[in-house]
Amino acid sequence: MPIHDEVASRFHLLDGISSLQEAMADPEKDRRVRAFMEPPLDAPPVAVPTRDLTVEGPHGPVPVRVYGDQAGTGRPALLWIHGGGFMFGDLEMPEADWTAREVCARTGAVVVSVDYRLAVGGVHHPVPLDDCVAATRWLRDHATGLGVDPNRISVGGGSAGGNLSVATVLRLRDEDGWLPAALIPVYPVLHDTLPAASSDVAALLDEVPPALRFTPEGTAGMNANYLGGQSADGYSFPALAELEGLGPTLLVTAEYDDLRTTGEAFVDLLRVAGVDVRHVQADGMLHGFLNLSATLEPVDAVLALMSEAVSTSSTASTLAPLEH
């Protein structure tokens, strides 16, 4: 389907901007990119209780934000990891805060959002991943005190956070013998080199402004920065991992997103490995659509699917099949 009108109507803000790197070096272009990325909300963010904490990690304290109160027992939980090319993002960005609020309000789940160390200033893999693993272990080990059923913990993330969510689960599978109830990567980057797009997909992607494209060259630079000179492996880019034994997975891609090729190829790898995987494409959407208001129908639909997975999954259940 065509790019969603609400998204396309703001493309003029990106006129004359060839890349996000270019915009970062020019205050006026950077302002326009931010205006595109964070449009005015049609409604205020959902009000839910929050508290900011730190958990211990191998590189020092890891800030987390906990959404939901501690009343009751046996609730589901979601460990949520924001994106930003491994170099950007924080707990305040819409993809982190709005998503956590929506899932918490829709499900009654406790949501823990992780402010992992970014790959800047000499920080590289596995430091961001170590922070996410530490936060997930904290949620798992403190589940009862948070009013959470330890068998109903899901792990998910968007973009680079989608990578980190899968890698976190792989680490915990291999190191702790533990799996979450559901794994929920949204528009993730899972290959160190992007799989090529088909001619049909490439034609769709040509409709996306250059500033919003994840070209092979740009993605290679982002991934190389994350690796910091190390060789890619299954914990840095999970497409290289042994995937057998992973639990139920809901993987979401966006129709107008260069990174859909890595998500789609990863779904195929999961199916070959015998993993129970559900793949959903958000039609008409670009990468990063969880930064948009839930008043947009495609955003609301994906949040509903994520919430369903969080609220209904347990380590004794599987996700029901859903047609792509």
Image (spheres, rainbow, N blue to C red):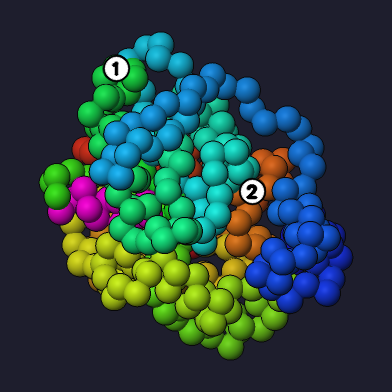
Where residue 165 is drawn, which disc sits there? none
Q: Position of residue 184 (x, y in %)?
A: 41, 49
Q: Position of residue 268 (x, y in %)?
A: 35, 71
Where residue 145 is drawn, which disc sits there? 1
Q: Which residue is labeled 2 in the image?
A: 291
User: In the rendered image, is residue 264 in sight?
Assistant: no
Asked whether residue 165 is drawn in magenta, I would say yes
Q: CA distance from mark 2 to mark 1?
A: 31 Å
Depicted 179 relative to depicted 109: above or below: below
Q: Position of residue 232 (x, y in %)?
A: 30, 73
Label 2 Cα neighbours within 10 Å, binned few <14 / some 14-19 / many ≥20:
some
Residue at horizontal 67%, vertical 41%? 294
Local secondary structure at mark 1:
helix
> Is residue 240 left or right of 306 when viewed as pictured?
left
Local secondary structure at mark 2:
helix
**Predominant secondary structure, magenta span:** helix
> Is residue 216 left or right of 155 when viewed as pictured?
right
Residue at horizontal 63%, vertical 54%? 289
Inspect the image, locate mark 2, and give the three-letter code of the amino acid beneath it. Asn
Asked whether residue 32 is drawn in magenta, I would say no
Residue at horizontal 39%, vertical 30%? 54
Q: Position of residue 132 (x, y in %)?
A: 35, 45
Whichever of labels 2 and 1 marks the residue nearer the N terminus, that label is 1
Depicted 80 relative to depicted 124: above or below: above
Residue at horizontal 26%, vertical 19%? 144
Quadrant the N terminus occupies = bottom right
Label 1 Cα neighbours within 10 Å, binned few <14 / some 14-19 / many ≥20:
few
Q: Are marks 2 and 1 in contact (CB under 8 Å)?
A: no
Inspect the image, locate mark 1, and give the three-letter code of the amino acid beneath it. Gly
Residue range corresponding to the magenta coloring: 164-174
Instruction: Give the quadrant of residue 211.
Output: bottom right
